[in-house]
Image: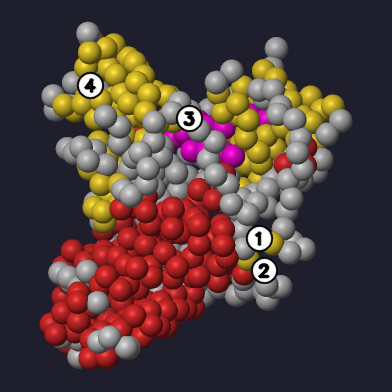
Amino acid sequence: MVDTPMTQEEKTRRGAEDAGKYFRYVTDFVGFTAQDALAIRESGLVIEKHLPQIVADFYSHLMRYPPTRKHFIKKDGTVDQDYLQKRMHHLTNFWRRTASGHYDDDYARYVDYVGRAHTMHGADPTIYIAERYVIGQVGFMQRAISQALTDELHEYDPDLENRAIRAWNLLMMVILEMLARAYTDEHELEPAGPLLAINETSMKDLAVHTYEAGLGLLRPVEKKEVRVAAETDIPDGERLLVEAEGISIGIFHHRGNWYAVRNHCLHRGGPVATGKLNGDVLTCPWHGYQYDVTTGSLLVDPAVKLETYPLELRDGEVVIRVPRKAEEQAFDFIIGEEKRLEQARPALPEGAFYLDKVPAGSVGLVQVGGQAVAVYNVEGEYYATSAACTHAGGPLNEGELKGSTIICPWHGSCFDVTSGAARCGPAESPVRPYRVAVEGDVGRVHPVD
């Protein structure tokens, strides 16, 4: 019998069916009882209080070690703050949900899903976090939570301190088993490398910002009304992608109602609003992450949501309210000799880029006439093509450049960057080539005449 390849949706849901049964089996095995769950609920506010600091300490720890730091570094060597904050948000939500003390089948499926998401069995086969780091995270959190309970309860309620520490220790055994069972014979060797000094103050500031944003505690952002389309432009059952204040937004006219969600998947920033809509379920085309289009909620973790925007119909027009564009605060995380200092340089016109931002063997991204264009450095020679794969729109700027061939990260289509020609499927059509002119330390992309 030949195994049929699984779809992304099947990968996302794989193993979830028996998660509740397995969770109960393991809790029975380690001796975690209803009284232990009660002790965790009673001490939940202690963990909430310390969670921003714990998350900041955890990511500072990850950023010190090259094998774990690499997951948060962009191609230009700088820290991907947006992705770092997404991971902080997911981790914060995981432990807030765990600290609630409620462990039903939905929670078990959630933990099972998180475990698979770190392996090649998850929705995104390009993401792999070695099992040692999953074990390390659980150990790190176990120590940090125990310390928080001792600091807060030892003097005032030693009985709750002892009960809560026992309960958390047992629960960590269960969580570790749930996370680890997704791994089979997957192993990854890694080289040793120098540790980095981390700006822990910046990491704490970002963790607190992420925590407060998740609770809706941040100061309201000034909103702007934007008319994005005529009502007749979007018949019932259709959608329209728009850009407002620099934000890509999907407008859905769905079953007589209207919804506006940010076109940015919470996993890896994929164009979620372009994905398949089946009933109320919107599936990101990159890695199969699924959301309720009516609320923006991630199905496997409803507390995590896409950004949504108020929408109303006014005089036959679709009007949404979005945050006014503002400069986002950037944090310096890495300090010491390896910190990359960005020298003050003038802003560049459309289509231009600094050459040192696209080193040999790498890919950059610019905008030309409102279109995303990928820039390639092939042994010091610069080439450019449209950034969207002609198969399913995958982002070629995030693909792997091998010689003069770019490989799409979605489905493996490959193109000759010197001409745009399709070299391997599933793509059959070429991507549009552009011309790159170099002057001094700046390159500029132009349409081919």
Check if residue 89 falls in the magenta segment: no
- Element under label 4? strand
Residue 200 location (% of width, % of height): 57, 65
Image point (38%, 82%), residue name: 151
Could you say which disc has been placed on residue 197 in the image?
2
Residue 39 percent coordinates (x, y):
20, 82
In this view, 3 is above or below 383: below
Q: Which residue is mark 3?
A: 325
Mark found first going from the N terminus, 4 or 1: 4
Cα separation, mark 4 vs mark 1, equals: 44 Å
- The quarter of the picture where residue 104 lies is bottom left
387 left or right, relative to 321 = right
Question: Within 10 Å of the Cα at label 1, are there few (<14), some (14-19), or many (20+) other Cα atoms?
Answer: many
Disc number for residue 312: 4
Horizontally, is 62 left or right of 434 in the view? left
Q: Residue furthest front?
A: 156
Q: Quadrant of the C terminus?
A: top right
Percent x, y of residue 323 = 40, 31
- The amino acid on which the numbered mark 2 sits, given as a three-letter code, is Ala
Q: Which badge, 1 or 3, is on the more N-terminal residue?
A: 3
Amino acid bearing label 3: Lys
| Bounds of the magenta segment | 382-397
Q: Residues within 10 Å of mark 4 (few under 14, many from 20)?
A: some
- Spatial CA span between label 4 and label 2: 49 Å
- Across and down, in percent, residue 303 comes to 26, 54
Can you identify the residue that label 1 sits on? 334
- Mark 2 vs 1: CB contact within 8 A: yes
Q: Quadrant of the N terminus?
A: bottom left
Number of residues whose C-alpha sits closer than 10 Å to that of mark 3, classed few (under 14), some (14–19) or many (20 or more) = some
